Image (cartoon, grey):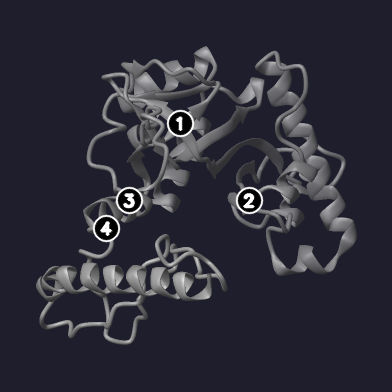
Amino acid sequence: MDFPFDINQLFSERISILDQNLSASRRSMERPDLQAQISAVIDELGRASAKAQQLAAPITSASKLQSQNHQLYLLKDRESGGGRGAAVGFLKVGYKKLFLLDQHGVHIEAEPLCILDFYIADNLQRHGYGLELFSFMLQHKNVEPVLMAYDRPSKKFLTFLAKHYCLMQSVPQVNNFVVFEGFFLNRSAVHLRRTPLKKPDGEIKPYSLVEREVVHQEQRTLPWPFAAPQSPQRSVTSQCSHPVRVGSSPSRVPPPVAQSSPLRGSRDQIEQLPLIERYRERRSSSLSRSQLDFH
C-alpha cells in the first residue's frame, strides 16, 4: 500500500511496534507532521481491513489506538514505492477479560492475549508476509497461538491458523471470540479461573445467628427468684423488671432479697424461700393490726 510520503522515514524497522504514543521512534514523537502521517497510515490500513472483512466500520484507527491499551505491529517493504517504502499490513493485539466456556460447558473467566485485527494488502497476500508478521508477534509476546483468543476471525485467517499452527478444533463460545482446544490446559490461575456459581436463595431466617443465640440464652435462664445473679455488682432489679412505685401494694411487688455470693449460686436462694414467705405473713398481719387500732 503506497502513500504520498516516505514510509521509510516514518518506520525505520521492517516491523514497527506502535502503541498509544503513535510513534515508531523518538524522532517521530518530536515532530507533529510525522505523527500525522503515521495516523494516516494506520487509518488507511484500518479502512482496508474493514472492507476486506465486510465490516460496517473500521475497528482499527489512530484515535482508537490512542485510547486503548493495544499494540499494533506494522510491516513495511523498504524497496517498494520507488525506494520510499510501502505498508504491507498490520496485526493488532491486546489483552481482554473474557467469559468463556470450556469443553464441558463450564464458565471460565480469562484474560488472554487476543488477536483483534489482522490484515495484509490484497495484492501482497500469499507471499509469506502474514506468517512473518504473525511469527514476529509470537516471539515478541512469548506466547503460543493455542493460548490466544481471536476476535471474529475471517475464513482466510482460520485457514491460515490451521495451515501453519494446526489449530482446527475450536471450542464454541457465546461471544465473537474463537478459542481452540488446548486453550484451557496448563494455564496460570491468574489468567484463568472458574467463575463462581451464583448462590441459590436460601431459607429466609427471622433473625441472625447472633440474635438466635441470645434467644436461646434467655430461654435457658431461670425465672426469678431461681436465677443466679450474673455478677456480684449487679442489683436485684434486672433491666427487664418493672420499677417499684411509691404506694404500691407490697403483695404485688416482692421485697428486695439480699444478694448471695456467686459461689453459692441459686441453692441459697431456694433455701431462702421459707424466710420470704414468713416475712410476707408477718407483714400482712402487721398491717391488719394497724388498721384495727385505727378504727
Name the spot of residue 92 as percent of width and height, x first.
Answer: 59, 39
Residue 123 visible here: yes
Gap in Å between the C-alphas at discs 1 and 4?
60 Å
- Disc number for residue 223: 4
Q: Nearer the viewer, mark 1 or mark 4?
A: 4
- Disc number for residue 99: 1
Q: In the rendered view, would you say 71 is above or below 80? A: below
Gap in Å between the C-alphas at discs 3 and 4?
14 Å
Disc 4 marks which amino acid?
Pro
Gap in Å between the C-alphas at discs 4 and 2?
71 Å
**Would you identify the image quadrant in which residue 289 lies?**
bottom left
- Disc number for residue 69: 2
Residue at the image position 31 percent from the left and 32 percent from the top: 183
Disc 1 marks which amino acid?
Phe
Q: Dot 3 corresponds to which residue?
A: 215
Gap in Å between the C-alphas at discs 2 and 1?
20 Å
Gap in Å between the C-alphas at discs 2 and 3?
57 Å
Q: Residues within 10 Å of mark 2 (few under 14, many from 20)?
A: few
Could you tell which of marks 4 and 2 lies nearer the N-terminus?
Answer: 2
Residue at the image position 13 percent from the left and 68 percent from the top: 270
Task: Name the side, left or right, on which 208 lies relative to 119.
Answer: left
